[in-house]
Amino acid sequence: METIMDIVNARDPFEKEFHQAVTEVVESVKPVLDKNSEYRHASIMQRIVEPERVIQFRVPWVDDQGKVHVNRGFRIQMNSAIGPYKGGLRFHPSVNLSILKFLAFEQVFKNALTTLPMGGGKGGSDFDPKGKSDNE
């Protein structure tokens, strides 16, 4: 399983939240992967830890005083193997790519446990809604 973490660390060296989530999952499924070589040959873990799509975009908006602000928006479409992407939105100043990849990764497993045909994704912005008016 070292190789999976090596790949994740090499591709995304500064995404500590995402690394932590992947490490926990890899450690928990290692016995299953060790017993079933077909999972390794099919690169199941490599496919699970790599998002299908990452979209990053700017979100310009005008406050009540007429000042223009620009925030970052993200949509992580992690995995659609069992159905369309399903996951919520997070608005908080601490939101970044690593946090949303971590949340989208976890969402894949949460949705799989419902037994409904849903994949996993997550979106959000570093916009802080606290203290903002409805217009903002």
Image: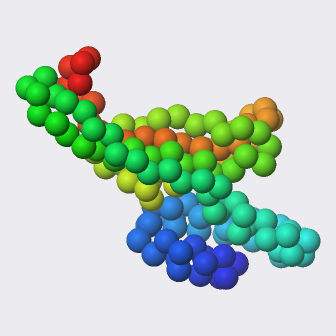
Left or right side of 72 for 34: right
In front here: 103 or 20? Answer: 103
Above or below residue 118? Residue 1 is below
Q: Quadrant of residue 133?
A: top left
Q: Quadrant of residue 49?
A: bottom right
Q: Residue furthest top?
A: 134
Is residue 118 in view?
A: yes
Residue at left offset 43%, top offset 56%: 97
Is residue 106 in view?
A: no
Left or right side of 50 for 47: right
Residue 24 in the image, given as x and y percentages of width and height: 60, 64
Residue 89 in the image, given as x and y percentages of width and height: 47, 35
Q: Quadrant of residue 25?
A: bottom right
| Applied colour scheme | rainbow
Above or below residue 125? Residue 5 is below
Left or right side of 56 for 85: right
Residue at left offset 63%, top offset 63%: 50
Which image quadrant: the N terminus? bottom right
Which image quadrant: the C terminus? top left
Residue 123 in the image, given as x and y percentages of width and height: 49, 41
Residue 30 in the image, given as x and y percentages of width and height: 75, 71
Residue at left offset 62%, top offset 57%: 51
Q: How many marks?
A: 0
In front here: 76 or 56? Answer: 56
Residue at left offset 24%, top offset 18%: 135
